[in-house]
């Protein structure tokens, strides 16, 4: 069992991360939700410019945010891969045969070009 108190991250618009216990972060979130007219709010002896707070995220969401920022991507199996790395998760873990690769636009275009050349040669 994880005895460490759950943390949440207050992500500022400038990219700064302010970590605090989930309970406090949720209080801050509620204050921000309720706040309609003040630019600054005082919270636990700290002051927040309400316009500077971008998101308040759970550790899970924060991990996802950080990984995406590092150009990692999540496959259908829920595993993370670095950019350019192919996913072989379903293949390796379930023994399914690999799915046909989805071609991107430039690859499809290239195939059309090759087909066109073949047609020209057949004339
Ligand atoms: Zn994968």
Image (cartoon, rainbow, N blue to C red):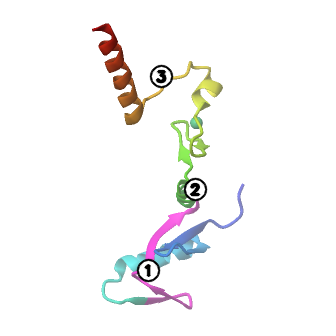
Residue 104 seen in the figure? no
* Residue segment shown in magenta: 41-59
Question: Label 1, label 3: how many angstroms apart (C-alpha)?
Answer: 45 Å
Residue 109, compared with residue 67, is above or below; it is above
**Residue at position x 37%, y 76% in the image:** 33
Q: Secondary structure at mark 1?
A: loop
Q: Secondary structure at mark 3?
A: loop
Q: Based on the picture, tell me whether residue 63 belongs to the magenta stretch.
A: no
**Residue at position x 57%, y 20% in the image:** 96
Residue position marked by numbered label 3 in the rendering: 100
Q: Quadrant of residue 4?
A: bottom right
Picture quarter with ligand 1: top right
Residue position marked by numbered label 1 in the rendering: 52
Mark 1 or mark 3, which has the lower sequence index? Answer: 1
User: Along the horizontal axis of the image, is 65 left or right of 37?
Assistant: right
- Front-most of 113 and 14? 113
User: In the rendered image, which quarter contains the C terminus?
Assistant: top left
Q: Position of residue 15 (x, y in %)?
A: 52, 72
Question: Label 2, label 3: how many angstroms apart (C-alpha)?
Answer: 27 Å
**Residue at position x 48%, y 22% in the image:** 100
Mark 2 or mark 3, which has the lower sequence index? Answer: 2
User: Along the horizontal axis of the image, is 114 left or right of 26?
Assistant: left
């Amino acid at each position: 069992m994880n005895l460490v108190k759950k943390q949440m991250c207050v992500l500022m618009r400038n990219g700064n991360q302010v970590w605090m216990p989930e309970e406090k972060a949720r209080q801050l979130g509620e204050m921000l939700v309720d706040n309609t007219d003040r630019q600054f709010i005082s919270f636990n002896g700290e002051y927040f410019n309400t316009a500077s707070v971008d998101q308040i995220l759970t550790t899970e969401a924060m991990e996802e945010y950080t990984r995406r920022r590092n150009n990692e991507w999540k496959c259908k199996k829920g595993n993370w891969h670095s950019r350019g790395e192919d996913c072989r998760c379903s293949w390796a873990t379930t023994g399914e045969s690999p799915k046909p690769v989805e071609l991107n636009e430039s690859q499809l275009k290239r195939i059309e070009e090759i087909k066109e050349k073949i047609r020209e040669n057949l004339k």
